[in-house]
Structure formats: structure tokens, C-alpha cells
Image: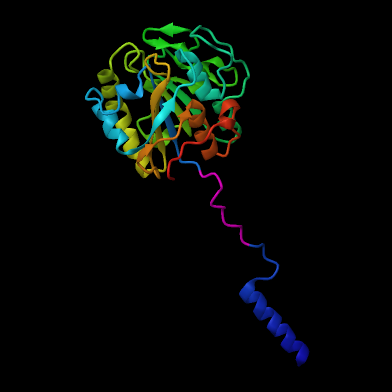
């Protein structure tokens, strides 16, 4: 009788607690990288922070700033344009100090390579790029000096897309996408008002979608208008972002570090020493 009773008790305990079953999976750590569904980085050209913030020529960007984390002490890392794009994409200027073409970065580590190795996707969308995979120096208002992924052998031609390939449904975007307007729409050859109108038309639909779909928009500039401080506008909008100004000094390496941290990627080059953008997420 006692043996039967001990067996019955053991069975009851198993029914309640589970015997021989695998333990439940541990809950995710709150500190684990939980990247947003998508990140879109848009790079404009050659305008300082003071030429944009509060200026009537940039009504859309100023409206966007009210919905964004705005970095009022953001800086390019160099002059002229090309080293900044390389730094933002690879954590290094790759020794480039001018806008020469072509640049041969070969197999140097870069963000696209990192994302692919981690099971994510990347694409760069350049306005006026004549065809997917084009690695020439220029065509019309397209300039390779603003397209760093074309410099790396580890980035497939399929990731180098014209802006006409931008999907109508943002859910079909790659994990991380860069967008490079042409030499007029990026404010390089044309004024702030032109670039602002382009941003309203092409970015506003995405940022409204991003706010509801765990995704981000990052807007930055390559460099300022030639001032010694190289102060630029950098902002982040989207899901989980606390709007408001941030005063700490940041640069292109900080932007790269922020993206890498969100997807659990090891920081590249200068990004390793950079502080991630404080976003309030």
C-alpha cells in the first residue's frame, strides 16, 4: 500500500510540474540587441546645421525634426564628400582624402558584409544610377563618390540599385537601406528648398510607415558648407524614438555604431570607439 501511495504521489507531481520534459526557453534579456524591422539611412550634401534648423527653406525637414531625435552637435568626419560616405558605411575612410574615382576598397569589412553574415539584407538606392550594379564614376547627376558600396568587392551588384527600384511597399525593403539623392536633390548642386521638397515627397510616406512598424529613418549629411567645425544635421525618426534635441557630440561613426548595435554586429573601425546615438528606445 505504501509503495502504491508513493508511486501515485510521484505521478501527480509529474503531471503538475512535468517530468523529463525540456525546460522552457529562457526569456530574452532586456539588454539583447532587438533591431528595428528596417533602417533607412538618407544622406544629403554640403549643408551645415545652421542652414537647415529653423530655416524657412526647409519646412519639411523642420517638421520632421519635431518628430525626431535631433543631434545638434553632429559632425562629418572629413572634407570633402567621399571619405564621409566611406566612414559611414565601413567605419573607415579607407585612406581616401579626396573625391577621386574609382576607389578600390576590395574586401575591406563593411556594413553590408556584416549584415549578410548575420542573416540580414542590405541595399543602396542611388538616384540616377543608370542600372543595377553600375560601378562607373558618373552618369548624369549620379556620382560614384556618394556611393561607397560600389567600392567593395564583397557587396554584390544586386545590392547596388537605382532609386527607381525602391519598393512601393516598405515591408519589402532590405533590413538596412541607404538612399542617395542625385546631385541636385541632395542639395549639392541645388538649394535647400529643392532637397527639402524631395524629402517630403520620398521620405514622408516611409517615416509614417516606420513609426507603426518598428522601423527607423536616419537623415544625415556628408559634410557642412566648408566650415571648420563640419557641423551637420543628423536625426532619427520612427518607432520607439523619443523626439527632442540631443547635445552630445556625434559623427558618422556614431551612426554606424547605432545600426550595428541594433543588429548585434561588432563595431567596425572608428565605430568601435564611437558612442551610439541616444534615442530613448
Instruction: Identify which residue is drawn at 57% across, 26% down.
Output: 270
Give the image quarter of residue 221.
top left
- Give percent across and percent down for residue 177: 45, 28
Residue at coordinates 67% horizontally, 75% vertically from top-left?
Answer: 14
In the image, the segment drawn in magenta is 24-34
| Image height of 29 relative to 46, above or below | below
Indicate left or right for 6 with 95 as reference.
right
Q: Quadrant of the C terminus?
A: top left
Residue 264, position as x, y percentages in the image: 57, 39
Whether residue 140 appears in this view of the structure is yes
Task: Report the front residue among 14 and 72.
Answer: 72
State the image quarter where residue 261 is shown.
top right
**Residue 189: in magenta span:** no
Is residue 30 highlighted in magenta? yes
* Residue 166 seen anywhere in this rendered image of the structure: no
Q: Which residue does the image show at 58% across and 11% down from the upper left?
A: 104
- Position of residue 99 measured from the top left corner of the image (x, y, whole percent): 48, 9
Amino acid at each position: 500500500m505504501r509503495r502504491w501511495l508513493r508511486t501515485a504521489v510521484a505521478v501527480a507531481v509529474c503531471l503538475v510540474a512535468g517530468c523529463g520534459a525540456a525546460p522552457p526557453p529562457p526569456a530574452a534579456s532586456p539588454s539583447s540587441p532587438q533591431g528595428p524591422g528596417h533602417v533607412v539611412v538618407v544622406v544629403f550634401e554640403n549643408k551645415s546645421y545652421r542652414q537647415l534648423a529653423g530655416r524657412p527653406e526647409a519646412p519639411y525637414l523642420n517638421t520632421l525634426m519635431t518628430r525626431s531625435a535631433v543631434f545638434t552637435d553632429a559632425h562629418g568626419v572629413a572634407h570633402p564628400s567621399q571619405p564621409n560616405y566611406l566612414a559611414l558605411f565601413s567605419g573607415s575612410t579607407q585612406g581616401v582624402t579626396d573625391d577621386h574615382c574609382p576607389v578600390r576598397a576590395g574586401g575591406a569589412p563593411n556594413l553590408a558584409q556584416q549584415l549578410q553574415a548575420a542573416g540580414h539584407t542590405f541595399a543602396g538606392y542611388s538616384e540616377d544610377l543608370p542600372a543595377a550594379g553600375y560601378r562607373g564614376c558618373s552618369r548624369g547627376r549620379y556620382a560614384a563618390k556618394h556611393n561607397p558600396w560600389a567600392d567593395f568587392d564583397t557587396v554584390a551588384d544586386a545590392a547596388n540599385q537605382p532609386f527607381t527600384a525602391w519598393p512601393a511597399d516598405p515591408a519589402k525593403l532590405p533590413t538596412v537601406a541607404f538612399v542617395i539623392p542625385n546631385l541636385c536633390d541632395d542639395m549639392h548642386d541645388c538649394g535647400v528648398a529643392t532637397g527639402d521638397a524631395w524629402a517630403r515627397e520620398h521620405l514622408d510616406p516611409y517615416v509614417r510607415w516606420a513609426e507603426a512598424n518598428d522601423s527607423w529613418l536616419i537623415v544625415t549629411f556628408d559634410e557642412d558648407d566648408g566650415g571648420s567645425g563640419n557641423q551637420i544635421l543628423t536625426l532619427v525618426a520612427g518607432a520607439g524614438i523619443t523626439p527632442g534635441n540631443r547635445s552630445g557630440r556625434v559623427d558618422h561613426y556614431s551612426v554606424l555604431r547605432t545600426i550595428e548595435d541594433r543588429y548585434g554586429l561588432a563595431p567596425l573601425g572608428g565605430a568601435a570607439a564611437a558612442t551610439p546615438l541616444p534615442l530613448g528606445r
